[in-house]
Amino acid sequence: AQKITQTQPGMFVQEKEAVTLDCTYDTSDQSYGLFWYKQPSSGEMIFLIYQGSYDEQNATEGRYSLNFQKARKSANLVISASQLGDSAMYFCAMREGQNFNKFYFGSGTKLNVKP
Amino acid sequence: EPEVTQTPSHQVTQMGQEVILRCVPISNHLYFYWYRQILGQKVEFLVSFYNNEISEKSEIFDDQFSVERPDGSNFTLKIRSTKLEDSAMYFCASSERLAEDNEQFFGPGTRLTVL
């Protein structure tokens, strides 16, 4: 089974509107961490936001927030007030409790922000 | 702000040739990683490295691959005899510690093209 599933290969959003990028995960560990990375067309991987499995509140970082629903094993990224510079690939990733050695990445969502 | 650097940014090589991809992790980080991203696909874990040893490697990391920390700063990935399917973006990453909440900082990547 896939550890991280991102079901939206591509998304469009109007500038200044909010958008939600979906991510579901699969783990039997009690302790895990969920991350979102942004990959612009230039190729680098930029860390956006982190959510711990024991965190009771949803993580927020500026315009980014994480809608964490533990029972549903989902960790959706919400970008508020989209900007043209938000156009990029977005990857959801996970580190598990027994093996913090690596990230499992999803297949990514390509976000296009329209002016 | 400290960052992970990688050289070269783009490497073109002939099939069968050896390549060495170089990375300088963040100076106080102890854990180092290589990931691969074939064009248009997800980021895949290759190997993690700690205390001058491989901690974990994926099934992709076969005998053609090796990693080394030749001095106190560089972390290298060697591909002994490149194949066409090795063409990909290779990301180096480092982290300060091994914990669920500890993000991995990624370098800008090296795009490897095997002809």
Image: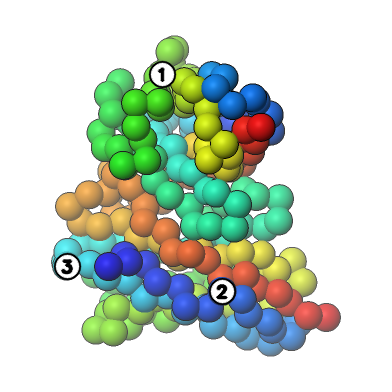
Would you call the spot at circle 1 few (<14 residues within 10 Å), some (14-19), or many (20 or more)? some
Q: Is residue B4 visible?
A: no
A114 sits left or right of A49 in the view: right
Q: What secondary structure is marked by label 3?
A: loop
Q: Is residue B29 left or right of residue B81?
A: left
Q: Which residue is mark 3?
A: A28
Q: Amino acid at mark 2?
A: Pro
| Residue at 33% across, 47% down | A102
Is the residue under label 2 in contact with that under label 1 (CB below 8 Å)? no
The amino acid on which the numbered mark 3 sits, given as a three-letter code, is Ser
Residue lying furthest right: A115
- Work out whether B106 lies above or below B62: below
Q: Amino acid at mark 1?
A: Arg
Query: Which residue is identified by label 2?
Result: A9
Label 2 chain ID:
A
> Which sits earlier in the primary sequence, circle 3 or circle 2?
2
